[in-house]
Image (cartoon, rainbow, N blue to C red):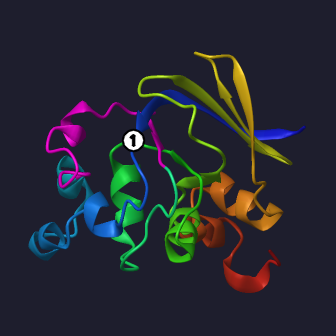
């Protein structure tokens, strides 16, 4: 397998149906849309102390239907601003999945039930997508991303991709 990106980090485990208002409350979004301010409120509805405990490189791990609810893009940009580069979930809401890709946040669809809070994870993104739980030595095969999505992620998101490739002229 060719690896284009490798991420390592501590698992931060959530449950099923984490909706966009849980990720960042829409009431906070009314106050500002500055991600550097909003990141201090990340997942406050689920755990008011969560944002203060996040370390750069942490990896969110969830169950089914992560990012359901409204299509607000800020729900993908705030975790990224907090230093989270990947989210592992059994499934994603389609809009959240695309918002994540477009903003450089890696959505990984895989079995997450055996991952525990604090496990050390390695995510390899390439021709295939794999997760290795270094704590338990388990290797998890994830649903591969299409090559054009990997290229967008390598660039850091859709806007940086288009800047690097001079707009829409390049075929994805």
The quarter holding residue 25 reads bottom left
Residue at the image point whose x is 66% and y is 65% from the top: 164
The answer to whether residue 37 is left or right of residue 59 is left
Answer above or below: position of 94 versus 44. Answer: below
| Quarter of the picture holding the C terminus | bottom right
Residue at the image point whose x is 64% and y is 56% from the top: 153
Q: Is residue 149 magenta?
A: no
Residue at the image point whose x is 75% and y is 54% from the top: 143
Tell me which segment is drawn in magenta.
42-62
x, y percent for residue 155: 64, 57
x, y percent for residue 104: 54, 57
Q: Outermost residue, left direction?
A: 31
The answer to whether residue 161 is left or right of residue 43 is right
x, y percent for residue 10: 46, 27
The answer to whether residue 154 is left or right of residue 15 is right
The answer to whether residue 96 is left or right of residue 52 is right
Q: Dominant secondary structure of the magenta stretch?
A: loop
The quarter holding residue 55 reads top left
x, y percent for residue 128: 83, 46
Which residue in the protein does label 1 denote? 83
Q: Secondary structure at mark 1?
A: loop
Q: Is residue 60 magenta?
A: yes
């Amino acid at each position: 397998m060719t690896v284009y990106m490798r991420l390592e980090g501590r698992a931060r485990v959530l449950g099923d149906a984490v909706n966009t208002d849980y990720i960042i409350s829409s009431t906070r979004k009314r106050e500002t849309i500055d991600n550097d301010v909003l990141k201090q409120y990340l997942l406050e509805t689920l755990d008011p102390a969560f944002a203060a405990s996040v370390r750069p490189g942490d990896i969110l791990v969830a169950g089914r239907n992560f990012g359901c609810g409204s299509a607000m893009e800020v729900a993908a940009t705030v975790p990224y601003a907090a230093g989270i580069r990947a989210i592992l979930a059994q499934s994603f809401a389609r809009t959240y999945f695309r918002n994540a890709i477009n903003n450089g946040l890696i959505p990984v669809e895989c079995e997450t039930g055996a991952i525990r809070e604090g496990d050390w994870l390695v995510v390899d993104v390439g021709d295939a997508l794999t997760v290795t739980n270094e704590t338990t030595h388990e290797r998890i095969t994830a649903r591969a991303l299409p090559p054009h999505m990997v290229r967008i992620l390598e660039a850091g998101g859709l806007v940086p991709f288009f800047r690097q490739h001079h707009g829409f002229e390049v075929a994805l």
